[in-house]
Image (cartoon, rainbow, N blue to C red):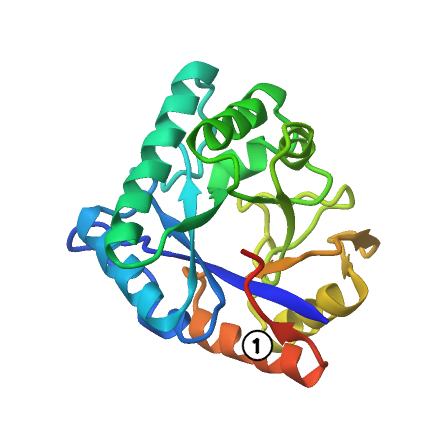
Amino acid sequence: MVIDLNSDLGEGFGAWSLGDDDALLDIVSSANVACGFHAGDPSVLRRVTERAAERGVVVGAQVGYRDLAGFGRRFIDMDPHELVNDLIYQIAALDGFARIAGTRVAYVKPHGALYNAVATHVEQAAAVVDAVHRYDRTLPLLGLPNSELLRQGADAGLSTVAEAFADRAYTPEGRLVSRREPGAVVHEPDEVVERSVLMATEGRVTAADGGVVTVRPRSLCVHGDTAGSVEIARRVREGLRAAGVEVRPFA
């Protein structure tokens, strides 16, 4: 049994830092790197792609709304054509730094509010698919199972990869509980590990209402900006190994 372990990295900006990219790059198999619109700047992008390349960690473009002040966690009702252009811009920027580091962007994952929007928003999901298709149709799309994004991506001939979240609560419909709601982020390490192993081995997770949600992920995300994220990620990887699950990139 194999699963990818990913984390959101490169989310600092200028003098402001967030998370421990170096430590997480020693644990994860894929890095969702911010592309400068919700977080990240040219120096951050270059540093993270270089260090990912050194460690053999696969680089993914984590694209989002142009919303540094809101960290990309506020929905923006954008013109789809403008959104396509913003997304191509972000993928290309990160890919440039990845290539001079000796690697490349190997997949695309939306961030924050855009990630949640494209689970159901037809036009914005189409914009993400169009951007990836125009830039490089061989790039896989990483997103929620049964989402509008993955449905449209598959219809367009893109490779799609279902993702689950080790440290986020789920609604009964299989969406992520809003960060505005209590309990949206799971902080207890033992619970995160237990949920991760269950998702990887049995393809299911307990929702916020106590019901069971089917996820069947090929990739598992541990957020890099959660308190104690490095130790949580390390324990998740150890828990997966103990359960007979090999951690390996999907791309």
Residue lying furthest right:
211
Q: Is 146 displayed left or right of 231 in the figure? A: right
Residue at image point 47% right, 78% down: 231
Q: Is 251 displayed left or right of 91 in the figure? A: right
Q: Is residue 54 above or below residue 97?
A: below
Image spot of residue 109 (x, y percent): 50, 44
Going by the numbered disc 1, the residue's amino acid type is Arg
Q: Is 157 displayed left or right of 221 in the figure? A: right
Residue at image point 54% right, 63% down: 249
**Would you say residue 228 is visible in this rendering?**
no
Residue lying furthest left:
15
**Would you say residue 84 is visible in this rendering?**
yes
Image spot of residue 188 (x, y percent): 59, 72
**Which image quarter holds the N terminus?**
bottom right
Q: Is 94 displayed left or right of 61 in the figure? A: left
Residue at image point 60% right, 61% down: 220
Quarter residue 124 falls in: top right
Pointer 1: residues within 10 angstroms few (<14), some, or many (20+)? many
- Which residue is the site of mark 1? 237
Q: Is residue 117 above or below residue 18?
A: above
Residue at image point 75% right, 56% down: 216
Image spot of residue 146 (x, y percent): 73, 39
Image spot of residue 81 (x, y percent): 43, 15
Number of on-image labels:
1
Q: Secondary structure at mark 1?
A: helix
| Residue 113 vs residue 187, the one in the foreground | 113
| Residue 152 vs residue 232, the one in the foreground | 152
Q: Is residue 197 above or below residue 141?
A: below
**Which image quarter holds the C terminus?**
bottom right
Residue lying furthest bottom:
242
